[in-house]
Amino acid sequence: MRLASAITSCIVSGLLVFSTAAASFAAPEDLPQVEAGDLDDASSLLALINPSTKLSPEDYTPKELVSVAGTSYQLRPEAADAVEDLVADARKAGHSIKVLSAFRSYQRQYSLFNQYQAKYGTAYAERISARPGTSEHQLGLAADLGYTNSQAELKEAFGRTPAGQWIAKHAVDYGLIVRYPQGMEKITGYKYEPWHVRYIGKEQAQAMADSGAETYEEYYSMLKDEAVKEPKKSQEPKNVPAVEQKKPESESDQGTATPGSGVLKQEDLDVLRFLPPYRDWSFGFIP
Ligand SMILES: [Zn+2]
């Protein structure tokens, strides 16, 4: 059983393009149980989206979006509540953070990426902007938070500020995760973004923290490994070998494009000196 589980874990991990680190975790027995369909559904609070995993449909738009209180930004209701609570409590703790960005539609990302691509070429466009269909902001579950009046805003240095540290420590209490942790670019496809939080729900966020997974890609892989394929009819004990429960889901050719790996031309490098190299930044820069 243990061996079978390990094998399945490897198969599922293999579905991720950036699988090397993901394979090193064993799925704990006590993960919240989810149905496999929930993981693949674009409208699921657990949906995975990254440069190698697109949504289906690619131009998915959340059914319900609400304004985050006191801002012009929108999120799905659950995420808006969580972000509002986190910001309010952070302020009580003395950190004057605010929401800098939240939902961005596929169409918005599409036009932004095309503008960058036309102006700077594909390689550089990929460094400064997510391709349409790969930005987590499309889910309506992610927000960028900033520390007002700080040079660290939307920079890695934000993670070293008291506000950034408060978010890293307390996000889980609101069902949020810091989605792009430091040193995990090979797995997440994104550089360290201490300002970008993603809602997955309190139970899941806590379970992820307890699981030891450092990235959502790894945690998602664990959930998938343990996911129930069909709704259970009764409380039958799990006596079916794990391998039989999980379909290997043939290698969907996800491609092997490594984010930001394109060869840069001299003119790209000239531009690079003036622009932030964050793919998640599809705002605040006017070509
Ligand atoms: Zn973001």
Image: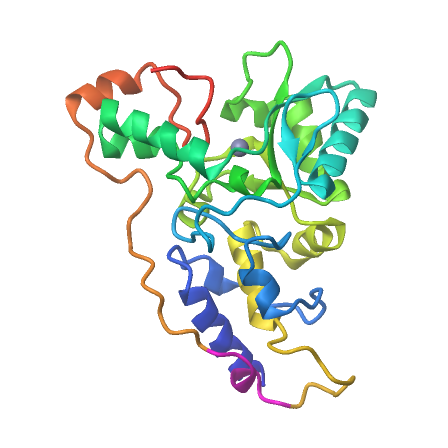
Furthest residue to the front?
63
Is 136 situated left or right of 253 in this image? right
Image quadrant assignment for residue 149? top right
Q: Give the vertical position of 167 relative to 53 (above or below).
A: above
Foreground residue, 179 or 182?
179
Nearer to us in this view, 265 or 166:
265
Q: Is residue 231 left or right of residue 21?
A: right
Figure check: 261 above or below 281: below
Snapshot colouring? rainbow
The range drawn in magenta is: 240-247
- Does residue 185 appear in this view? yes
Q: At 75% from the left edge and 49% from the top edge, which residue is drawn? A: 202
Task: Determine the residue positioned at 71% across, 35% down.
Answer: 80
Q: Quadrant of residue 278?
A: top left
- Residue in the image at 52% along x and 40% along y: 138
* Residue positioned most to the left: 266
| Drawn side of residue 54 relative to residue 264, left or right | right
Give the position of the N terminus as an image quadrant. Answer: bottom right
Give x and y (percent) for residue 59. 45, 46
Q: Can residue 181 be seen at all in this image of the molecule?
A: no
Identify the residue at horizontal 23%, vertical 16% (top origin): 270
From the top left corner, tell me how far across and down residue 46 is, in percent. 61, 54
Lateral position of residue 188 relative to residue 229, left or right: left
In the rendering, at what x and y percent does residue 167 appear? 68, 32
- Residue 244 in magenta? yes
Is residue 9 highlighted in magenta? no
Please state the horizontal and vertical placement of residue 145, each as a whole percent of the image.
62, 26
Classify 14 as above or below 273: below
Looking at the rendering, which quadrant does residue 129 occupy? top left
Which quadrant is the C terminus positioned in?
top left
Farthest residue in the right direction? 92
